[in-house]
Image (cartoon, rainbow, N blue to C red):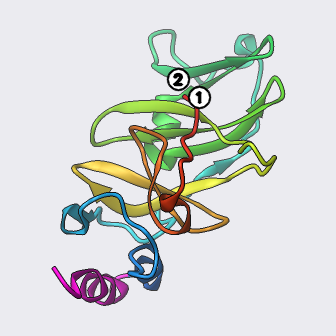
Amino acid sequence: MEGYRAWKASLFSRIDPAFARFLDPAHPMRIRPEEIVWGGVKKDGIPALERPDSVPARDAAFLEDEEMVFGVSFGGAARAYPQRVMDWHEMVNDTVGGQSFAISYCTLCGSAIAFATQLSDGRRLLFGSSGLLYRSNKLMYDQETLSLWSNMTGEPVAGPLAGGDIALPI
């Protein structure tokens, strides 16, 4: 529908001006804009964790034995992220075993996915929570280009990077 994205960008910008940049009609979009909805928070209203402090498992007395964690293992190193912490942050940007990655946790669909975040040109993308949803799944964004990314596929779906063939490895 002609003009719909511009109208939606203008409408959503009343909630948060960043939403207008995410929905800018000048950039490619791979998903239907009418299926993008506000998730109830502004951009970064749920702040991402950036290289959080960690403790060895034997020193994690704050965890219960049955508590759910999301784990990653790269290059012989491993780290666990408690679900209760991810409930509050939904995104973590970290490096383990020399591998930079982001974990995107969607509280609505209960999925946590780790994506490698170093692009083929050497750039490392950092991600945050956009505050927007697509088909009840969070849309994350990269801080460099403000492109929106699918939480499920690791592909840019709107913004400057949506026109290419980038996909973050899971």
Q: Kindly check if marks 1 and 2 are in contact, taking CB atoms under 8 A apart as contact.
A: yes
Q: Residues within 10 Å of mark 1 (few under 14, many from 20)?
A: some
When asked about the image quadrant of residue 34, the answer is bottom left
Q: Is residue 4 magenta?
A: yes
Q: Which residue is mark 1?
A: 81
Which residue corresponds to the image point at 80% horizontal and 15% vertical from the top-left? Answer: 75
Q: Position of residue 109 (x, y in %)?
A: 28, 37
Q: Is residue 127 at least partly visible in the picture?
A: yes
Q: Could you tell whether 166 is left or right of 51 in the image?
A: left
Amino acid type for the residue under numbered disc 2: Phe
Quadrant housing the C terminus: top right
Residue range of the region highlighted in magenta in the rendering? 1-15
**The label number, if any, that marks residue 70 in the structure image:** 2
Q: Residues within 10 Å of mark 2 (few under 14, many from 20)?
A: some
- Nearest the viewer among 149 and 57 is 149
Amino acid type for the residue under numbered disc 1: Tyr
Q: Could you tell whether 79 is left or right of 157 in the image?
A: right
Q: Position of residue 10 (x, y in %)?
A: 32, 90
